[in-house]
Image: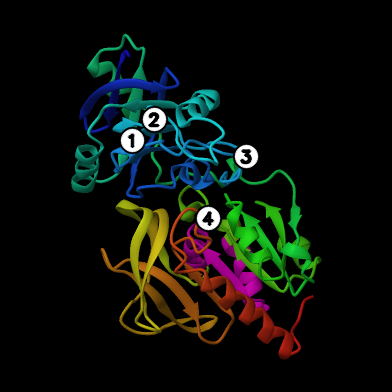
Amino acid sequence: MSKAYLVLDDGAIFEGESWAAVGETFGEAVFSTGMTGYQETLTDPSYHKQVVIMTAPHIGNTGMNSIDMESTKIWVSGFVVRNPSPRVSNWRSEGSLEESLIKAGVVGISGVDTRAITRHLRERGSMRVGIFSGTTLSRDEMVIKVRATSQMAGAFLANEVTTPSKYVVSPSDGQPVKYKVAAIDLGIKNATPRSMSERGMEVTVYPLGTSAEEIKADNPDGLFISNGPGDPATMTQVVDLVREFLLDEIPVFGICFGHQILGRALGFDTYKLPFGHRGINQPVRNVRTGKVEITAHNHGFAVEAPVDSNFQTVYGSGFVSHIGLNDGVVEGLELLERPAFSVQYHPESAAGPHDAAYLFDHFAEMMAKKHVSGGSHA
């Protein structure tokens, strides 16, 4: 194998071996702490413009398949592993990880100490990165190219991952339609509307830019705001849309990017985390129950809201419903006087633990209460 280089914008260079597609690629360097679930990570649109470093040393042993795809393609800009599996051993596998990355044109690097890179990022923060293989550039030239690329702060990326047109996911197993959900696609994963469909929800997925009037014309019972890439401070159109639904007291549920957007709709600021949370093993405390949930994360921004008392908004009072135990980050918001809530993590559990699946049931309960009160939009 030929040499390859992982180059960070602070000048640090890690030398490894060319793996997956050959060439050069750039993005934000982020690390994922999951020991499995790499296919769901690769195909999650939230990772658009990011180079993912896997902290687990052995990656690729279960291969790739069509069932676990979270979208129609691989979205990561680059993939970094220490020891790629030399063979695939899983009855569901339809091909190897490296074959899939090569087909998608994703440049990778192997043979590097991914935990050393992770420690570097934890100490200095997420930064721009480049992977170079088959290159004749000098070390200084590679660093210069990395420093010339754009940063994630201020990035507007949802328009690059949203669906081109709306589509409908019907309730699974022939269930009747209990509730109609309007989902704003900012980078939605396949497992999310599927999780709602399993609970009798008919989910209409709308592209970014759809107006509140167009969505309301379809008479939804609730609004869902999806995960996605980029800086939530750039999402002014969706923030305004959410505010319209809050005023009409239509139930609102946001996850990940959608959580940050709800936070901004409530009047809170968002900020860039030093290195973010990514992986399927993040501990979160449910403030209401005191229970600790192990959850799946992928976010580099967070909401700035008070965690030690209820807060006041133009939509009434609310509280921080979940708190990250690793660093005290706000992981959930809920209003007390209107049907709206959000979490910073992924309750669809793809891949990952199922501790947070109850949140879809909570959303159904909110829509059920609207039915009882005579406020149904079905």
Q: Are marks 1 and 3 in contact (CB under 8 Å)?
A: no
Identified at 44% across, 57% down, the residue is 352
**Mark nearer the viewer, 4 or 3:** 3
Q: Which mark is residue 128?
A: 1
Magenta residues span 239-264
CB under 8 Å between callouts 2 and 1? yes
Callout 3: 10 Å neighbours few (<14), some, many (20+)? few
How far apart are labels 4 and 3 at the CA level? 16 Å
Is disc 3 placed on a helix, strand or loop? Answer: loop
Q: Which of marks 2 and 3 is in front?
A: 3
Left or right: where 101 falls relative to 274: right
State yes or no: discs 4 and 3 in contact (Cβ < 8 Å). Answer: no
Of the numbered discs 4 and 2, the one sitting upstream in the chain is: 2
Q: For the point 53% across and 55% down, which residue is it?
A: 227
Q: Name the residue under label 3.
A: 72
**Where is mark 2, residue-wise?**
149
**Image: 70 above or below 180:** above
Q: Earlier in the sequence, mark 1 or mark 3?
A: 3
Q: How far apart are marks 4 and 1 (CA)?
A: 22 Å
